[in-house]
Amino acid sequence: MNTENRPPHARIALVTGAGSGIGRTTALGLLHDGWTVVLAGRRAEPLQALAQEAAARGQTALAVPTDVTDPASVQALFDTIEKRFGRLDLLFNNAGVNAPAVPMDELPLDKWFQLLNTNVSGMFLCARAAFSLMRRQAPQGGRIVNNGSISAHTPRPFTAPYTMSKHAVTGLTKALALDGRAYGIVASQIDVGNALTELSERMTRGVLQANGTVAPEPMMDATHVADAVRHIAALPLSANVLTMTFMASAMPYVGRG
């Protein structure tokens, strides 16, 4: 792990969507690296279980049930972080949802708004609050890592809502990277393809392809994604990975179309 320019204070990280999947795996990795990790997510039980698991190993984790689509809930989360730790050094802006893969005119509008509120508004609200705290704290600065997707580059069939949301994440990441320069705030985006989690396991049994066929796809272990986030998090603020495309080597991405 790179220790150049390591801050003299305890390193505080926030992981959203920490109760399962990539979020949980990344939180575990950061705890292993010595970070104090704030665990945010909608379901209290898995967050508390992870915090207890960390405590049993002598690590420090704080579970804060949070709905990232609710501005008051996000504000309460960051108020808790500031009151408890006084600062935030890393936000892994990970919380996200998908929508059914159907023609867009068949998608119930409530599913669209749920996705939009989580993947776009929720990510913005967390980035906004982190930006504010990182500007005000001393020493100033910090790192925001947004979880994008291969869909930030190109869609799968019948995924217009999800694809739109992940293109929006790219815009947010680049704007944060620009606007944060004056305050020592850097932003990254990791675009993940086919990491095996509870939600993506179905892809091993078959996914609709652009030619109309359904085919299983190669997957990679989610710990590799966590390791990539850990690498970015360990960099000094003078260096940054602006965007990273991280994928199962044999998945049908390169060559699509």
Image (cartoon, rainbow, N blue to C red):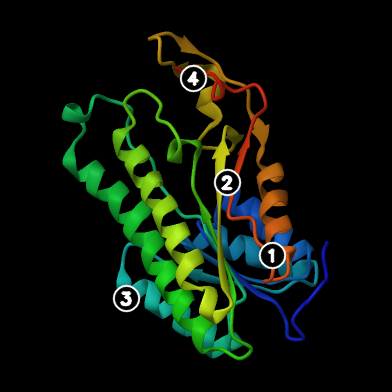
Ranked by sequence position, the earlier of labels 1 and 2 is 2
Residue 55, image x, y percentages: 73, 71
Amino acid type of the residue that numbered disc 4 sits on in the rendered structure: Arg
Ranked by sequence position, the earlier of labels 1 and 4 is 1
Q: CA distance from mark 1 to mark 3?
A: 33 Å
Q: CA distance from mark 2 to mark 3?
A: 25 Å
The image quadrant that residue 192 belongs to is top right
Crowd rating for badge 1 (residues with CA inside 10 Å; few <14, some 14–19, many 20+): few
Q: Which mark is residue 256?
A: 4
Ranked by sequence position, the earlier of labels 1 and 3 is 3
**What residue sits right under mark 3 in the picture?**
72
Amino acid type of the residue that numbered disc 3 sits on in the rendered structure: Ala
Amino acid type of the residue that numbered disc 1 sits on in the rendered structure: Ala
Ranked by sequence position, the earlier of labels 3 and 4 is 3
Ranked by sequence position, the earlier of labels 2 and 3 is 2
**What residue sits right under mark 1 in the picture?**
239
Q: CA distance from mark 1 to mark 2?
A: 28 Å
Q: CA distance from mark 4 to mark 2?
A: 26 Å
| Tag in front: 1 or 3 | 1
Residue under the point 24% across and 24% down: 103
Q: Is residue 161 left or right of residue 75?
A: left
Q: CA distance from mark 3 to mark 4?
A: 42 Å
| Tag in front: 1 or 4 | 1
Residue under the point 38% across and 45% down: 167
Q: Is residue 59 above or below residue 231?
A: below
Work out which quarter of the rendered image holds the C terminus and state it: top left
Ranked by sequence position, the earlier of labels 4 and 2 is 2
**What residue sits right under mark 2 in the picture?**
21
Q: Is label 1 in contact with label 3 (beta carbons under 8 Å)? A: no
